Amino acid sequence: MSLISFQKKKDAEKLVCLTAYTHYMAALAAPSVDLILVGDSLGMVQYGMKSTLSVTLDMMIMHGKAVVDGASSQVPVIVDMPFGTYQESPEQAFRNAALIMQQTGCDGVKLEGGQEMADTIGFLVQRGVPVMGHIGLKPQSVHVHGGYRMTGKHDTEKKQIKADSDAISRSGCFAMVLECVDSDLAAQITNDVVCPTIGIGASVKCDGQILVTEDILGMTGHKVPSFVKQYADLSDTIRDSIENYTQDVKKGNLSD
């Protein structure tokens, strides 16, 4: 599916998106989903970091290339721009977005921010870089906005998030992630903007959904957010398999 086809699905069936950080996970997900995101959440899921703030451009490029290769052009692959690689200026954002696309072969980039990032998004789009926006709860700004929490419940915050959605939609983003946005506000934004909305903890009223794949598979080793439906508990399966292997080695039960 191309990004143009992805956009056209806004008024059709729900869009299915998942994260992937590795070649094999991308290969497994690609036949079933509409878009794969190489999220900067890889810092926590793959590296055990406490937040996304320590993720580097080199990390995103390395994982991005692996995912693009694994997806084999079956679905669009979008790569997150990490903290500090786009906020300084539109020119900085373009240099780093171009580097990501050149070195990974991905279809576009995602960056966080609303009105303050609208000019940057427009600058990138005008220069051939497809951009997925991200508003509501913005993990790269979590220290400024008071932690991981639901957003858009109070009038002041609701007006700000609505203004953010309008601004980045006008700037030309091909889709926007609504993270932990109040369901009524998510429905209003979805109705008003031209591009598809992709929810994560923002109710079923968005045009599509995205989750961290390891969360739905039970592979994170910690409690998942309340909005995540787990479809498997592979941690126990992996743990049991390793223990069975260990016992076989000790008892000499392995095949020659």
Image (tube, grey):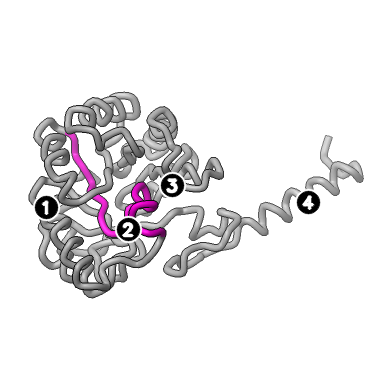
Residue beneath disc 4: 243
Residue beneath disc 3: 41
* First along the sequence among labels 1 and 3: 3
- Would you say the residues marked 4 and 3 are in contact, meaning their CB atoms lie under 8 Å apart? no
* Range drawn in magenta: 129-147
* C-alpha span from label 4 to label 3: 29 Å
* C-alpha span from label 4 to label 1: 53 Å
* First along the sequence among labels 4 and 3: 3
Residue 219 in picture, x, y percent from top left = 57, 54
Residue beneath disc 2: 137
- Would you say the residues marked 1 and 3 are in contact, meaning their CB atoms lie under 8 Å apart? no
Position of 175 compared to 200: left or right?
Answer: left
* C-alpha span from label 2 to label 3: 14 Å
Would you place residue 28 above or below residue 189 in this image?
A: above
Residue beneath disc 1: 167
Element on which disc 3 rests? loop
Q: Is residue 146 magenta?
A: yes
Three-letter residue code for mark 1: Ala
Residue 168 in picture, x, y percent from top left = 14, 50
Q: Residue at x 33, y 57 (%)?
A: 145
Position of 188 compared to 30: left or right?
Answer: left
For label 1, count other residues whose C-alpha is less than 10 Å away and answer few (under 14), some (14-19) or many (20+). Answer: many
Instruction: Using the image as rendered, state which of residue 95 and residue 75 is in the foreground.
Output: 95
Element on which disc 4 rests? helix
